[in-house]
Image: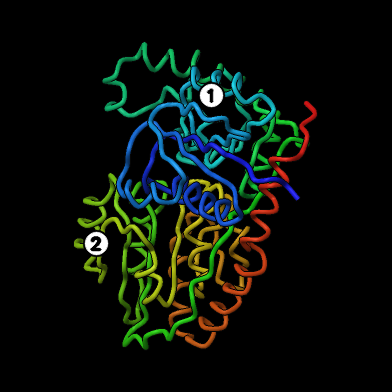
Amino acid sequence: MLKKQNILFISEYAGFFGGIERYAWLAARMLREAGHSVHYLYRARARGFEEFSQGFDSVNAEMPSADFSFAVIHKVTDNGLLRTLLGRFGKNLAMVFHDHDFYCPRKYYYIPFGRRNCSRAYALFLCGLCGMAVSPKKMTRGPFRELSEKFHAFPERFRLLHSIPKWVVLSGFMRDNLIRNSFDPARIHLIHPAMELPPVAPRPENPVPVIVFVGQLIRGKGADSFVRMLAGLKTPYRALIAGDGNEAENLKRLAAELKVNAEFTGFLPSTEPVYAQADLAVFPFRWQEPFGLVGLEAAAHGIPAVAFDLGGVREWLHDGENGLVVPSGNEAALTDAVSALLADPVRRKEMGARGRRMAAEEYSKEAFIQAYEKLMSEETHP
């Protein structure tokens, strides 16, 4: 049995900024319940900082002087800090690849020319040029700054990441992406996130089905596809859009133009109130979601889901079992799938029950802790 560890998590934000922070918070809670100590190093505060901080033994804006036995990077883009962490922790260092930032200079693994998702391995010149195709707003920071980032800082960061002894991914999709980018498969650990099942509670009998979208209101999450899908429904419904982001006002205008029945909740520190009243969750991701923690949360609450088929979605969404998978970007197919489930409450209930069982059996806290303890104890052989 592994002795109790003193662990340091490192990331950009402290607070519930997005999926990375929620994952780190949940992971810390579970590891602490297993008797380990978990501390957190961050660069900037985000919303929900106080509640977030309660999930850790300490939260620090400066490198703590304590003697840590293991460190886990969740997101660090500062090359100097990466070098410091490599020097301080050596073989007792791991990094969780939550997104595409570290092998795609554009960050979204998306080709702007032709508006399609990418599947290439990183290449300095080609990807550097693609990464330079940024918005005019970003270019106001200066073209030389962009050139330095894409052709100097990013390649150095890519090399530094290959020096980290252990890498963690949340899905087979991300494992394949790392292998494509020359990461040694023997050092990649596939550790699914764990999900604590909420207590079973009587669900309200909604007068009309409640459809929910949960996530950041940014282009890559596809909330605009959700709104257009609502406009195509022929049966009564109520819709909740939970989250905020830089597309919020555009989405509200789109909903008004299409005259859809959608309630925007804004940022919520917990998804519990949304899933407690939901009959169906829809996740029309536009970018290649590395995992999609919100989908697993829906399953844990016994809510069936409909989602586009890309990224790591099929890790938690089994077509025809706990929801429906539709071709990526096909909004007509999305509307048809949602319509079919709205018309069949018995099927929705059966799918929701199967999703909850899947979350309990395949994403248990015990399996997660065991995998993390193996990560910390296993010798690395570069």
Q: Is residue 270 above or below residue 93?
A: below
Which of the marked residues, 1 or 2, is nearer the chain's N terminus? 1
Q: Is residue 165 left or right of residue 251?
A: right
Instruction: Identify the amino acid type marked 1.
Output: Cys
Colour approach in the figure: rainbow
Q: Which residue is mark 1?
A: 127
Q: Is residue 207 left or right of residue 380?
A: left
Q: Which residue is mark 2?
A: 255
Secondary structure under the numbered disc 1 in the rendered image: helix
Residue 53 in the image, given as x and y percentages of width and height: 38, 46
Residue 329 in the image, given as x and y percentages of width and height: 48, 54
Secondary structure under the numbered disc 2 in the rendered image: helix
Q: Is residue 71 above or below residue 216?
A: above
**Front-most of 50 and 280?**
50
Q: Is residue 230 left or right of residue 372?
A: left
Residue 285 in the image, given as x and y percentages of width and height: 46, 53
Mark number displayed over residue 194:
none
Q: Mark 1: few, some, or many residues within 10 Å (few <14, many ≥20)?
A: many
| CB contact under 8 Å: marks 1 and 2 | no
Q: Residue at x 48, y 67 (%)?
A: 298
Quadrant housing the C terminus: top right
**Front-most of 234 and 223?**
223
Residue 192 in the image, given as x and y percentages of width and height: 63, 53
Q: Residue at x 53, y 62 (%)?
A: 296
Instruction: Identify the amino acid type marked 2.
Output: Ala
